[in-house]
Amino acid sequence: MKKRIGGLLLALGMLLALCGCGTTEDGGKEDVGEKEKIQIGMSFDSFVIERWQRDRDVFVSVAKELGAEVNVQNANGVVAEQQKQIDYFIQKGMDVIVIIAIDPASLRDSVKKAKAAGIRVVSYDRLIDDADVDLYISFDNEMVGEMMARALLDKGIDENSNVIMIGGSPTDNNVPLVEGAFKRLMAKHRVTILDAIHADNWRAEEAAEYIYENPYQIAQADAIMCGNDDLATQAVRALAENRQAGQIYVVGQDADLAACQRIVEGTQVMTVYKPVEKLATRAAEAAVALAEGKVLSGDDVTTMDSGAYQIPCIALEPISVNRGNIDEVIIGSGFHLKEDVYLNVPGKMPR
């Protein structure tokens, strides 16, 4: 009798164990909880720009806390590779695809394919225009341009001054927004834009190359507006070789550590701090909500004209950073450590 009861209990235990497992198509066992997790594909332009690594880490962490898994892919600045990555995400049946576009115009068909497959699409930081994306989330790029212009005006740039613009990739839809706002304010104060170029694919070395190859224009320039801090890094290095660093005002954006160091050293006037933790957190929350079939809501959610479509939009506010507020904004927020920002000026390290 004891042997029979033991055998029945063993059989019952095996049956319960089998009921608690799912099965994959190839017959392998799979955890049901894992299968039901929200799947998000995230395709980055590249990680050449310092801030993108922060965006990635925060987005992945927040999405994980919300019960989602994120597959991160890096296109290394190659459009065809980014298209392949999006096709891969579609084949894998992702719930949401988040795209940091290299060339927005080249991804419109990719967005159509994803939407046709019932996948939600988030255009992250760079707008994929004329595409039916489910959300465009970024910072107020016109405000970025205005902040750059204001910083130069505050330094005394006026109708007698000349400014050179070294902009970012011409395929990045944020670039004309930033530059348009900058130019409008310069025109209002009758400041001369002496020259303007663009760095293809945000190739920072082009800033240094321009300075080396155009000594006549540089000699006439009072300021250089750089599309981001990577470009500013190369520009200041080239200026330093000509002993002009600090004599020509330089502005940028992204609050890279090197830019913050230059601000306290006196070789860069300002940078625009875009709290990427806030952007990535909000984007992860929105992506999960979209995957769950929810309508995006909140005081920060508006709509915008994206060419052929009206799309949901979230535009966060950036912060202008200069020598006067860098301790409060950058160090106080923990974006960079005090000892790192003041690394090259230890005698001026704040207590």
Image (cartoon, rainbow, N blue to C red):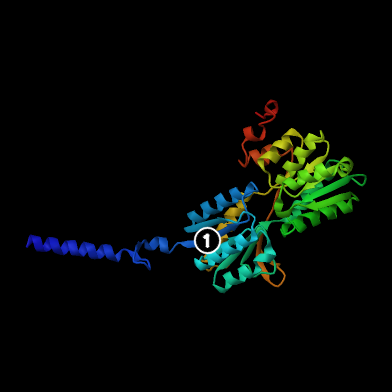
Q: Does the image show residue 297?
A: no
- Asked which quadrant contains residue 158, the reply is top right
As drawn, the residue found furthest toward the front would be: 213
Q: Residue type at mark 1: give it.
A: Ile
User: Residue shown at 70%/40% (left/top)?
Assistant: 259
Across and down, in percent, residue 203 comes to: 71, 50
Is residue 115 in sight in this rendering? yes
Q: Is residue 249 left or right of residue 18?
A: right
Examine the image and state in which quarter residue 307 appears.
Answer: bottom right
Q: Position of residue 336 (x, y in %)?
A: 62, 39
Classify residue 154 as left or right of residue 144.
right
Say if 168 sits above or below 258 in the image: below
Disc 1 crowd rating (10 Å Cα; few below 14, some 14-19, many 20+) is many
310 or 121, which is in the foreground? 121
| 56 displayed left or right of 322 | left
Q: How many marks?
A: 1
Please determine whether, in this image, residue 161 is positioned above or below residue 66: above
Q: Quadrant of the N terminus?
A: bottom left
**SS under mark 1:** strand
Q: Residue furthest top?
A: 347
Between 100 and 337, the residue placed more toward the observer is 100
* Residue with the most extreme left position: 1
Q: Quadrant of residue 250?
A: top right
Which residue is located at x 67 percent, y 30 percent? 350
Task: State the quadrant of the C terminus.
Answer: top right
**Which residue is depicted at the point 56% across and 53% down?**
59
Q: Position of residue 233 (x, y in %)?
A: 72, 41
The residue under label 1 is 40
Q: Position of residue 79 (x, y in %)?
A: 64, 60
